[in-house]
Image (cartoon, rainbow, N blue to C red):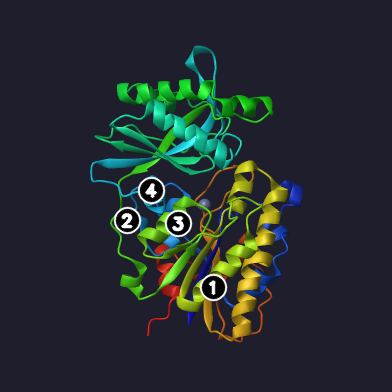
Amino acid sequence: MKYLILIGDGMGDFPVAELGGKTPLEAAKTPMMDELCAKGEFFLTKTVPDGFPPGSDVANMSLLGYDPAAYYTGRAPLEAAAMNIRLAPDETAFRCNLVTLDHGAGDRVTMRDFCAGHIGNDEAHALIADLEKECATDQFHFKPGVSYRHLVIFKGEHPGFVTVPPHDHIEQDVTVHWQQYLAQPAWQKLLDCARRVLADHPVNLARISAGKNPASLIWLWGEGKMPSVPTLTARFGIRGSMISAVDLLKGLGVVGGLSVIDVPGATGYIDTNYEGKAQGAVDSLKDGNFVFVHLEAPDEAGHQGSVDAKITAIEDFDSRIVRPIVHHLRQTGEEFRVVVTMDHFTPIALRTHVSDPVPTLLYDSREQKAGSGRTFDEKSCREHDAACGNGLDAGHRLIDKLLIHD
Ligand SMILES: [Zn+2]
């Protein structure tokens, strides 16, 4: 038996007026997911436990079978794991976004862009290299990641301030949060240095003259120490792979003991290598019996507030990831069980995550039920879930539902 979990990050949404009250998932043409949904089980899964923020880290940790209440220590240490950075016990990893901050009158600071215009890797790496050269100390080191997503490794006592994700504060006044860092001398020194290095950096000057948002500053958040996590092999006897463009997911794969497959051209955006991801999943199942495939693009479209991009990303997920994988497994006659779901909603109207339970389908290739006619979307799932009351309140149990223990 092969087991698959296929995730369209942030696919869920609320009704959108310009779609005549449909959600992007309802409006998108998703024949493969609809078929699996009609023939399989369909239920709501609570991926974000009460008291946790609706982050991709928490939600995907649940989907991978780990209770965030027991194992979650922060997003950044997972990203560190993906980058093969081993944190010492006295070290804390912080996510370091390259952001565009506007400094206004009276020290007011506004988050213009949480990702500095989705800055490219080469540009970002030049900036991070210079930040490390100019601003690193015994306490702080910069580690380059992908696009706007990097890390700062901090050695010492956490100052106790509360950090916030920059994508939750787009176009908002973030002065209060900014001043928390500045209240700590060592952190103020780091940020002053970063501001100076970035202000007239050739990369930023070129971006500004091209009409793009510069990486005017860094934003530190999502910090934590390395979690201690038993592998999925130890817990369930499965051997498998993680396929994602995003370091956070790769890190979850590393701590879960999965092989992390690097797919060339996997970008995390709508231009990602869909076919490469599907092929990677199919190839990995030749040796292993479990694969987790994650597509970031619908979430990015949600953060951008782009209905068209979100629909395209969802349709591509269906036709270029879910369908080729399912078709391949059917052709080879391999028995399989597959979950298709999302980690959380990223509603177009809010441009950030919410923790509503997520529509989830579970299909078993051995079932030969006639289709129920229901479709894979939020409304259909709510109606179905209300009818049979089989929602899953603890998202980390989804993996128990997927795996057959014999
Ligand atoms: Zn997510």
Q: Which mark is residue 250?
A: 3
Q: Secondary structure at mark 2?
A: helix
Gap between marks 1 and 4, in whole Å? 26 Å
Residue 328 lies left or right of residue 255; in this view the side is: right
The residue labelled by disc 1 is 283
Residue drawn 47% across the image and 20% down it: 196
| Cβ–Cβ under 8 Å for marks 1 and 4 | no
Residue 301 lies left or right of residue 110; in this view the side is: right
Disc on the earlier residue, 4 or 3: 4
Residue drawn 46% across the image and 51% down it: 247
Q: Position of residue 312 (x, y in %)?
A: 71, 55
Gap between marks 3 and 1, in whole Å? 18 Å
Q: Is residue 393 visible?
A: no
Disc on the earlier residue, 2 or 4: 2
Q: Residue type at mark 3?
A: Lys
Q: Nearer the viewer, mark 1 or mark 4?
A: 1
Q: Residue type at mark 4?
A: Ala
Q: Nearer the viewer, mark 3 or mark 2?
A: 3
Residue drawn 61% across the image and 52% down it: 297
As rendered, which of 202 and 363 lies closer to the eye?
202
Q: Tell me the quarter of the picture where residue 185 sits.
A: top left
On whether ligand 1 comes within 8 Å of the CB at mark 3, the answer is no
Gap between marks 3 and 2, in whole Å? 16 Å
Q: Secondary structure at mark 1?
A: helix
The residue labelled by disc 2 is 71
